[in-house]
Image: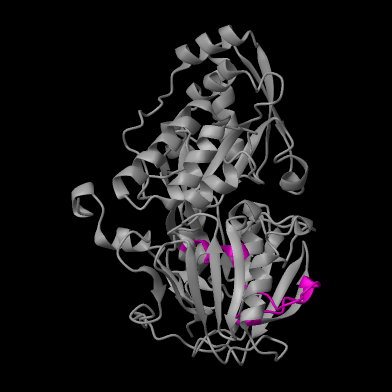
């Protein structure tokens, strides 16, 4: 059966490693991009995103939020990097190829230098990838790295990766944030010594990072800017005010309601990136009340998705269905019946659960969660259920409440493939298994899907996994949220990358100032 007969384009098949000749190479892929405006060199910008904590890190193994990701891309490079269609392109690698999807040969760029002047070699790659497997490092991508059965240097500019089972998505995996390459033997990551577009001049966790142009950067002509200061400003109003007052040039992840103020101000623009980002209602399956299947189902039926989409996100969103694969993803299952807002069914399930009230933790930290919680509270009040809201500040939410409170919200950045997303958030051993859902059948399907090269069978496997999450996990996903960045009109070069706002957090080396 052809790709076209299954509803897949040749481009999708190539991206997912399903066409003949698994892998990527530099030939024909790194095409210079045409811009409406010619990039200009020089100048500096200050950019701010919505997360900030004393736990901010430059250690790729511990990076777990958008601010961390943006810093990683300022100072490091991956073996591969995504374009706007999530095709993995060569970066520090010149090719990533395999004949069987299990044993992969990775050829590396020659002549690349680390910020301290030492040469980039295969040993740096082996060290960078292996450390995610070491339990002592507590890497957030350890569940993904475990499939790296052997990582071996085969030449100064070549490594071989042998997987525990075939996985045609390895070039995609190597492009995710945490797999950027660090110098062999690094123990102090506060210096940010990598091969990236900027040298780390300052890193103050919870305060700011300051990067200056890397004069020896291997991507010719980049970066365009001389300096980038990156901040975390958790409060949306403060972030927008900082932009409009001229204190920063780029504000990431602004609230949809703030777009009106930005559009009304002269010299500023709004930039939308459609993505699979979502703010989810989290119910721990191993806690009293929230672990009751009828309570979980009631909360899912009480989510007024259309109202959330229109009033909370001003239609900068797509309707969700309590599973994490968004409609733009090639593995999205349209056959899964859409769960509707149904107070009567919610009341039925709450009566079965014999639960009359609950306390829900919400915060400005997870995008839109306070407004979503109020909508949920009003719907609960309509059926006689007492839903109390505990509003906590954004500062400290991720360290004190997320993954700890049995009934709260989270915010998940988009991931480049369905398998990576499910591995990080829904596999039984996942570091961010938000609802503590564990299912051996799901775990097996997840692993088997990596090796499956038949498109029809693979799509069916992902459809089964979406159904299982929809029906069994303690997660409610009402909508998928577009990324909205705001910036001065002088800032050019932003493009939409589905892995998140700010060009998938890789804006620093790609933007410039006009005038």
Residue closer to the observer: 21 or 73:
21
Q: Is residue 1 left or right of residue 52?
A: left
- Residue at the image point whose x is 51% and y is 61% from the top: 173
Which is more toward the observer, 440 or 221?
440
Is 118 drawn above or below residue 321 in the view shown?
below
The answer to whether residue 466 is magenta is no
**Closest to the observer: 270 or 152?**
152
Q: Is residue 8 above or below residue 438?
A: below
In percent of width and height, residue 103 lies at 49, 66
Give the residue drawn at x 53%, y 12%.
349
Confirm whether residue 222 shows in the render: yes
Secondary structure mostly seen in the magenta stretch? loop
The residue drawn where x is 69% and y is 61% is: 61
Task: Give residue 22's quadrant in the image.
Answer: bottom left
Q: Position of residue 288 (x, y in %)?
A: 71, 19
Q: Is residue 367 left or right of residue 342?
A: right
**Residue ID at (23%, 47%):** 6
Q: Is residue 266 visible?
A: no
Question: Up-down: is 107 above or below 476?
Answer: below
Give how far across and how far down residue 388 sits, in percent: 68, 23
Segment tinted magenta in the rendering: 172-198
Looking at the image, how many numbered discs can be counted on the residues? 0
Q: How is the image coloured?
A: one colour
Residue 194 is one of the magenta-drawn residues: yes
Rendering coords of residue 138 (x, y %):
74, 55
Q: Nearer the viewer, residue 147 or 213?
A: 147
Asked which quadrant contains residue 39, the reply is: bottom left
């Amino acid at each position: 059966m052809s790709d076209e007969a299954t509803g897949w384009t040749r481009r999708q098949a190539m991206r997912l490693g399903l066409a003949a000749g698994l892998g990527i190479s530099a030939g024909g892929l790194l095409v210079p991009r045409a811009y409406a405006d010619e990039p200009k060199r020089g100048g500096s910008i200050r950019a701010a995103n919505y997360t900030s904590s004393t736990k901010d890190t430059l250690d790729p193994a511990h990076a777990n939020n958008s601010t961390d990701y943006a810093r990683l891309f300022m100072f490091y490079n991956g073996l591969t990097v995504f374009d706007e269609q999530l095709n993995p392109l060569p970066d520090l690698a010149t090719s990533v190829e395999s004949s069987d999807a299990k044993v992969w040969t990775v050829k590396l760029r020659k002549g690349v230098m680390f910020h301290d002047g030492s040469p980039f070699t295969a040993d740096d790659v082996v060290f960078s990838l292996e450390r995610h497997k070491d339990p002592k490092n507590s890497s957030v991508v350890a569940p993904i790295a475990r499939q790296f059965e052997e990582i071996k240097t085969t030449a100064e500019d070549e490594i071989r990766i042998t997987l525990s089972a075939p996985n045609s998505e390895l070039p995609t995996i190597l492009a995710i944030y945490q797999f950027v390459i660090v110098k062999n033997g690094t123990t102090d990551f506060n210096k940010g010594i990598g091969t990236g577009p900027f040298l780390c001049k300052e890193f103050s966790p919870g305060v700011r990072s300051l990067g200056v142009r890397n004069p020896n950067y291997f991507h010719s002509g980049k970066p365009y800017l001389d300096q980038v200061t990156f901040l975390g400003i958790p409060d949306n109003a403060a972030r927008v005010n900082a932009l409009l007052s001229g204190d920063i040039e780029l504000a990431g992840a602004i609230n949809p309601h703030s777009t009106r103020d930005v559009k009304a101000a002269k010299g500023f623009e709004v930039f939308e990136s459609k993505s699979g980002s979502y703010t989810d209602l989290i119910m721990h399956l191993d806690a009293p009340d929230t672990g009751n299947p009828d309570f979980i189902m009631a909360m899912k039926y009480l989510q007024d998705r259309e109202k959330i989409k229109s009033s909370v996100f001003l239609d900068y969103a797509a309707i969700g269905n309590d599973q994490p694969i968004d409609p733009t993803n090639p593995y999205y299952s349209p056959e899964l019946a859409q769960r509707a807002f149904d107070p009567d069914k919610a009341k039925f399930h709450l009566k079965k659960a014999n639960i009359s009230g609950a306390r829900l933790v919400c915060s400005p930290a997870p995008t839109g969660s306070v407004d979503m919680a109020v909508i949920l509270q009003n719907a609960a009040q309509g059926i006689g259920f007492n839903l109390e809201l505990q509003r906590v500040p954004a500062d400290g939410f991720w360290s004190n409440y997320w993954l700890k409170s049995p009934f709260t919200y989270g915010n998940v950045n988009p991931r480049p493939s369905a398998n990576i997303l499910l591995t990080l958030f829904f596999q039984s051993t996942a570091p961010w298994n938000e609802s503590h859902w564990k299912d051996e059948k799901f775990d097996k399907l997840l692993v088997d899907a990596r090796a499956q090269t038949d498109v029809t069978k693979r799509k069916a496997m992902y459809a089964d996994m979406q159904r299982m999450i929809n029906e069994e996990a303690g997660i409610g996903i009402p909508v998928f949220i577009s990324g909205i960045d705001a910036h001065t009109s002088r800032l050019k070069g932003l493009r939409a990358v589905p892995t998140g706002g700010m060009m998938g957090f890789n804006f620093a080396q790609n933007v410039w100032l006009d005038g």
